Image (tube, rainbow, N blue to C red):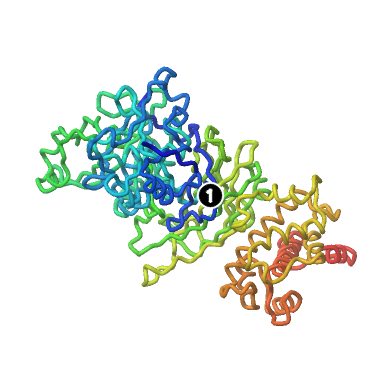
Amino acid sequence: MAVHVSPSQERGTMLAPGSALMWEQGWQTTGATGSLQNLKKFNNQDFNRLRALCLSQGLLFEDATFPAHVSSIGPNLLPEDKLRQIQWKRPTELQRNPYLIMDGVSRFDIMQGEIGDCWMLAALGSVTLQKQFLENVLPKDQGFQDDYAGIFHFRFWQHGDWVDVVIDDQLPFLNGRYLSVHPRTSNEFWPSLLEKAYAKLRGSYQNLHGGYLSDALVDLTGGVQVQFSLKDPPPDLEEILKAADKSKCLMGCSTSGQLRRNIELRNGIVQGHAYTVTGIAKVRYRNDWKHIIRIWNPWGHGEWKGPWSDDSPQWDHVEPKFREALFRNKADGEFWMSYENFQEQFSWLYICNSTPTFLDFGDQRCTTWSVDRHMNLCSPVIATAGAVSTNPQYFFKVPDYDPKTYNVVISLMQKHAEGMQDAKNLKTGFLITTENSKILKQNFSLTRDVTNYFILSPGTYAVVPATTEDQEFEFILRIFMKNQDYNENPNSPPSPVLPMDVPRQNRDSSYKAVFLRYAKQGSAIDASQLQQLLNEVILQDEMTSLGGRFSFDSCRGILSLMDLNSNGRLTLQEFGSLWRSLTKYMVIFSKEDRNHSGFLDVSELKSAIQTAGLAANEQLLRLMALRYSDAARRIGFSDFVCCMLRLETMTYAFQNLAEGRSQILMTAMEWLTLVMYT
């Protein structure tokens, strides 16, 4: 029996970078932080509660949110007549003694089925090699022997959060064969069940039929991935590969041939297909050294037939100790090939890890990476020099660098709106600008994840997310910086980069939505509306509210500083500039309020000014404290905002008028116009 519990054509399809991709089903949670210790629950389904309920009733779980029905397969994966023939079977119906895992987890447990999800299985094969990632995805608190109730769960990283996905164990079969991935050992079911959970997260099995290996690597690890073109490789690619292998990165590769997918060439390589890179070695060969690469095919068979393959004569000329350690003549889909043949036969290499350790080559010191995250913000449309002034900017500071090593990695991931799993990716990317808003670098792509690595000299930079299309988009921006403070303690925390994120409680709302809510159908907001907005939205955080509310007079002052049209109101564009300043100063305030008192003292104010990239001498600092602090010489958040906005505005006003000079000449009326309104 089963209990129905309601919740509170081709193989190996691989999309090349630049192709379009279908997206996953949206999810909702309550009260979860999205960490591995406090997971978000997909569809609000709690694995332990549901399993306990099923066990108490002696029945098997049936998942109403991803049922054993054609809707979970997808309408376009198979012809309609074949869709009607699909049967769903539990492992207990297939085997007398099924297991979730037998003799550990291995890539050789996986054999791809009819669904073209080689991109996901290639990433999964790599995860099996790195146990620290595998344990995050595959929980140990489940199986067929103890507390079996037909329910399982798996974890995936989605848009900055770890999500727990619950499934029942009914698997789809067509004509008696697995439609999905099937295990090499008949009574081991972890590959099929994990694939089903990922299909549920993505909306259907159909949404696994074609995808990006880069996406799957990130979804299975929460890490940062970089893809390298093997047709136009960076000059240090071989060193990157060695560093990736040494630091236990996940690696995959893919072949080209979008119009000839799954065509197996005479040499055994499949076109339009994804593979796992499982090892790199240097072997003694004919009195010389040779670099070879080991690769695994998610089909579970189908291998390279050229030099260094299983039947290759090259192995006869390798020293016995190397041959014994590396050579494995078995039809399991895994093979060796030379570095030169690897570049010839494959188009893309993908490398992923928690931090970009694959860029640590050439540096013998103990290095660490820090990461700064900015989540779920909406960006206005524009991907030109004008984006610098209108789009959100996220600042970071490079204190020092080695000109021979990469020290910054930028990763931008777009997020589709809820319920838009069929949406195509926008062409999104980012600009990197200098302090004077000069565009230094730019990267754009149709892939979900736009990531690149740089060598940046000391200075302050800004990352500007943007799109080339006439549409807003939500994103997660991650800025990875190599820690240049090489002290004797390798476990010391990395120095933080300057965060410019929105308040956590407002991270799911764009400034446009906030503006429209308080504009009351109008096209601008006045000081009274601004006061209501700031007190209700910005001061939701307990720490920022301790220093008192925004007064009407302070809101009039803030409005005048941002009012470019001098009409006593803020337009959407003007409010956007204010919103970015507010979010910037909220993070700076939180960072400098080291004792979490909700106030800054004078020394903390001085540090906050420096963090914001502004200047104030001791006399000016004393006057600011006198003007904005309370009787105990403490500054709350609302007064801090007023103080910083005025300092920032007046600083930039002087710089614009001075045009590089240290002095400016103004008439009395020009001076009075400046100081009396602003």
| Viewer-side residue, 426 vs 149 | 149
* Residue with the most extreme top position: 81
In the rendered image of this protein, does residue 189 appear above or below residue 435? above
In the rendered image of this protein, does residue 120 appear above or below residue 609? above
| Viewer-side residue, 306 vs 205 | 205
Residue on which the image places disc 1? 29
Please name the amino acid that badge 1 sits on. Answer: Thr
- Packing grade of label 1 (10 A; few <14, some 14-19, many >=20) is some
- Residue 138 point in image, percent of width and height: 35, 48
Residue lying at 69% horizontally and 82% vertically, measured from the top left: 632
- Residue 269 point in image, percent of width and height: 28, 29
**Residue 417 lies in what quarter of the image?**
top right
Residue lying at 38% horizontally and 48% vertically, measured from the top left: 56
Q: Is label 1 in a helix, a strand or a loop?
A: loop
| Viewer-side residue, 586 vs 325 | 586
Image position of 113 (left or right of 520): left
In the rendered image of this protein, does residue 587 appear above or below residue 348? below
